[in-house]
Amino acid sequence: MSDALFPVVAITMGIMMLAAGIAALYVRRLLSAIIIVAFVSLSASVLFLLMDATDVAVTEAAVGAVVSTMIFLWGRGKIGGDR
Amino acid sequence: MIRSIFGLILVLVLGAIMVAVVPDIEYSEEIHGVGLHYTSQGMQETGSANLVTAVIVAYRGLDTLGEVVVLFCASTSVVLILSLYPLSLKVSRPSFIVAQTSRLLPAPILLLGLYLIAHSHLSPGGGFPGGAVIASAFLLVMLGGTGVPGSSRNLAAVESLAGLSFGLLGFWGVMKLGQFLNNLVLGTGTPGSLVSAGLIPLISLVIGIKVASELSSVFAAFRYKGGH
């Protein structure tokens, strides 16, 4: 990633994550909200990678994008689907 | 209505605090203080080529022990609560794609997790992400319905053993060098080789096993009635 391109990519991804975060609050289906939160986690992981924080990126991808998403999904199953 | 107004006020207050505090944080290009010591001496002192792991496991090993304890308490409470109130989770048959993926992918994912743990002192990774990756391999097996992870009792035994080993590795430092969790009970070796960096690889392994078994037991508690 060249130095000139980095702010553009970072700000674009930041705006996308912000929009996704707000969308997760207002979206009607719980399932969609969970997938949007997973997207935010994955974007955060890519941003960490671009900022050369590879250790944090690996952890965020494993814990934020996979483990917490699965726990949310099964929690949704436990409370009986979308409400 | 009152709740949303209260929430709005809370957000505004937090925002005001952020606006007040953030400009006062000083960022500088040069590293100073304890960070300078870590970046200049860290590699010689710990023998770890990955400075992040050196800080997490060697310099701040006690904090990591605390973190492991916090994670233990969290996963224990999740499993406890879910076993007290076993709500039924409708488990449908996995689709063709999930079933086939759960046969193919767990082995490479497991390998990646083991790599992250074994090379924690050489490349990005470490016990926590490695353990989470290994747990996600078990998760895929559970999703595919091709197998069931070990019983919750076995998982708890593995987890306790790993936690105990962390403490024992710490006390090894007390016995040998008079300091809890001293990294130098084993030689540092050549930085960059697989067998180097003192205790770091062993502690990473222990953390990885512990995190993997904890997350697996949380998954199992969600997936199966009464934890299994």
Image (tube, coloured by chain):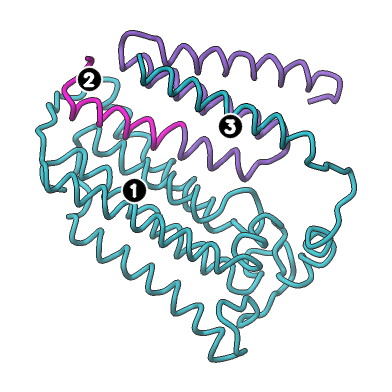
Chain colours: A purple, B cyan
Between disc 3 and disc 2, the foreground one is 3
For image coordinates 30% across by 64% down, the residue present is B158
Q: Label 2 sits on what residue type?
A: Ser
Q: Which residue is labeled 2 in the image?
A: B95
- Check residue B186 for magenta coloring: no
For the residue pair A33 and B89, the one nearer the viewer reads as A33
Left or right: residue B104 compared with residue B181: left
- Are the residues tagged 2 and 1 within 8 Å (C-beta)? no
Q: CA distance from mark 2 to mark 1?
A: 24 Å
The residue carrying mark 1 is B215
In this picture, residue A76 sits left or right of residue A55: left
Q: Quadrant of residue A28?
A: top left
Q: Amino acid at mark 3?
A: Ser
Q: Is residue B111 visible?
A: yes
Label 1 to label 3: alpha-carbon separation: 20 Å
> In the rendering, at what x and y percent does residue A27 appear?
38, 9
